[in-house]
Image (cartoon, helix red, strand yellow):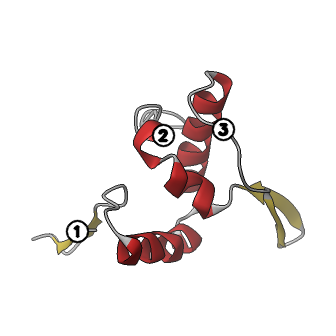
């Protein structure tokens, strides 16, 4: 998983460039740190792939509460197992 600090001091991470076990572990950490909007785009891509039967659900959903609001999100292993399919369903303009 490539990481780069750009000239304008922004951190660039190739989040979907997962090649080995170390990358998988890094992905799980980054997944926990992603903000809601970024996770939502990735999860929506997963659901589009699921509806199109391009992926199959293997893991339970993760339920948690933050500031009194209940959230349901995918297990990061679900994303990792289907990462090559999910990238084809991501809509970068969604939610703008």
Which sits earlier in the primary sequence, circle 3 or circle 2? 3
- Marking on residue 2: 1
- Secondary structure type for disc 1: loop
Identity of the residue drawn at 69% across and 55% down: 74
Instruction: Tally the marks.
Output: 3
Nearer to the camera, 78 or 90: 78
- Give the class, few, some or many, for how many residues have Cα within 10 Å of label 3's Cα (few <14, many ≥20): some
Q: Determine if residue 55 is in view.
A: yes
**Residues at badges 3 and 1 in contact (C-beta under 8 Å)?**
no
* Left-right relation of 33 to 51: left
**Residue 36 seen anywhere in this rendered image of the structure:** no
Residue 86 % position (x, y): 48, 40
In the picture, measured across the screen, residue 24 lies left or right of residue 41, that is left
Give x and y (percent) for residue 56. 66, 38
In the rendered image, residue 65, in percent from the top left (x then y), is placed at 85, 70
Circle 2: element type: helix
* Disc on the earlier residue, 3 or 1: 1
The label on residue 86 is 2
Say the numbered circle drawn on residue 56: 3
């Amino acid at each position: 998983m490539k990481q780069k600090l750009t000239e304008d001091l922004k951190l660039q991470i190739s989040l979907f460039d997962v090649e080995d076990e170390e990358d998988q572990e890094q992905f799980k950490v980054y997944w926990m740190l992603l903000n809601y909007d970024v996770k939502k785009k990735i999860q929506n891509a997963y659901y589009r792939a699921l509806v199109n039967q391009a992926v199959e659900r293997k893991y339970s959903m993760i339920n948690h509460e933050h500031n009194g609001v209940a959230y349901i999100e995918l297990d990061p292993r679900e994303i990792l197992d289907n990462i090559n399919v999910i990238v084809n369903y991501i809509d970068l303009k969604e939610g703008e």
